Image: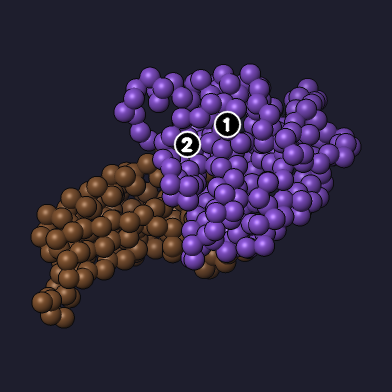
Amino acid sequence: MTELDATTREALAELLLAVADDEFVIGFWDSEWTGIAPMLEEDVATSSIAQDEIGHARALYELLAEVTDDDADRIAYGRDPEAYRHAALLNHRRGDWAFSVARRYLYETADAVRLEALARSSHERLAQLTGKMRREETYHLLHAEAWLRRLADGPADVRERLADAIRRLWADAQQLFAPLDGEGVLVTAGILPQPMATLHAAWTARVRAAVEPIAGKLPDAAPSADGRTTRTDDFRWLHGEFTMVAGGVEAATW
Amino acid sequence: MVTPVDHDLRERRIWDELARIADPEIPAISLVDLGVIGSVVVDEERARIEILPTFVGCPAVDVMRSEVSDRIGALGVADRVEVEITFQPPWTSERITAAGRERLRLSGFAPPHVGPTIPDEAAGLDELAVLPIAECPYCGSRNTTLDNPFGPTLCRAIYHCADCRQPFEQFKRV
């Protein structure tokens, strides 16, 4: 691949950081279920999915570190909470099981749309990595869909908890497609094959059809410019948890 | 100066040694039979080996990397050994050799389901995951059920055999 100019490099770094932080933070929220999921099989599944997501984040941080001449460990663990760029969907603590299932469904469907696009990126390394990630994420998506159906077909109180979680998360889920500052440059270069707005439209059409029968008519909602920059106390708490070792043991690495 | 014969011999010795390095998570199978060795290139002063991780987040990759580096370094066939991790081509379960599939079965793992080549289309990807039936590695029965598409490592799923009443694992198809 030819050498990127400074503007393109900066835009690519912004994209990589957004996707990596999404994977990293949802991986850590999922790991909060290890040992206390509703059943043993789910303990194993949630832990395995969390390990996948954090592994994806690591590979993306390593690619980012090459692009920006930085260090993957520093990017992952050496930032203040305000410097993370995950979508607002991932600002909430794990909540109950229905809440986690609703969030995971909204996340996995969006991630599938995003990875399908990135696997066609003109940036060879990014296309290779996301192409490989997609094969693994297929298992996550099927798992999320199975749980959504299972809770939706459950007793009335279960279905209502799920519906309530979907309604609460709906606006924040849009932010997975929040516009990036350097998006125009990335689309022109084919690094991001389609604008976030196009990906958002594809995702919305698919997801509304699946969740509105459960949660009722959902309001019109669009990604906003601050969709990846607002942080919460829930996230600040998680950040304290996942940086505890790196912050306390100077020589700690992945 | 390296003659073509020397070159082929050195390359052969590297492949032979790689075939003796066990997978860190399933020691019954070698890295070569698992299909994670992408390429071996030897030139005047270095040997370059590409490893294709089974899963992006596989925690065994760092162990594989240092094991390959140490063992090939100890062969003395090159002044320098370079081990690279790459996703091109992506590792898929079709890369496991016939011998490797048999080794998996003998150690209680159902080898991954073999199907038509997986197309890189969204529809094709959905089909690859979570097959309801796997052949029991203990009794050969197909009267089995999927307990959990996620198992003790990223690459394994858990099944149960209704005939010999054994739980068993299958190496996932990706």
The residue where tag 1 is placed is A83
Residue B86 lies in quadrant? bottom left
Q: Residue at x 47, y 35 (%)?
A: A76
Type of residue at label 2?
Answer: Ile
Q: Position of residue A168 (x, y in %)?
A: 78, 27
In the image: residue B171, left or right of residue B48:
right
Q: Where is residue B29 in the image (x, y as percent from the top left)?
A: 28, 53
Return the residue found at the far front.
A6
Q: Nearer the viewer, residue A107 or A214?
A: A107
Type of residue at label 1?
Answer: Ala
Quadrant housing the N terminus of chain B: bottom left
Q: Which residue is drawn at 46% across and 30% down?
A: A77
Which chain is in purple here?
A: A
Residue B138 in sight = yes
Q: Which of marks 1 and 2 is nearer the N terminus?
A: 2
Q: Where is residue B115 in the image (x, y as percent from the top left)?
A: 51, 65
Residue A75 numbered mark, or none = 2
Can you say whether A43 is above or below A135 in the image? above
In the image: residue B168, left or right of residue B7:
right
Q: Which residue is drawn at 48% across and 43% down?
A: A61
Q: Where is residue B80 in the image (x, y as percent from the top left)?
A: 18, 59
Residue A216 numbered mark, or none = none
According to the rendering, which colour does chain B have? brown
Residue B62 lies in quadrant? top left
Mark 2 chain: A
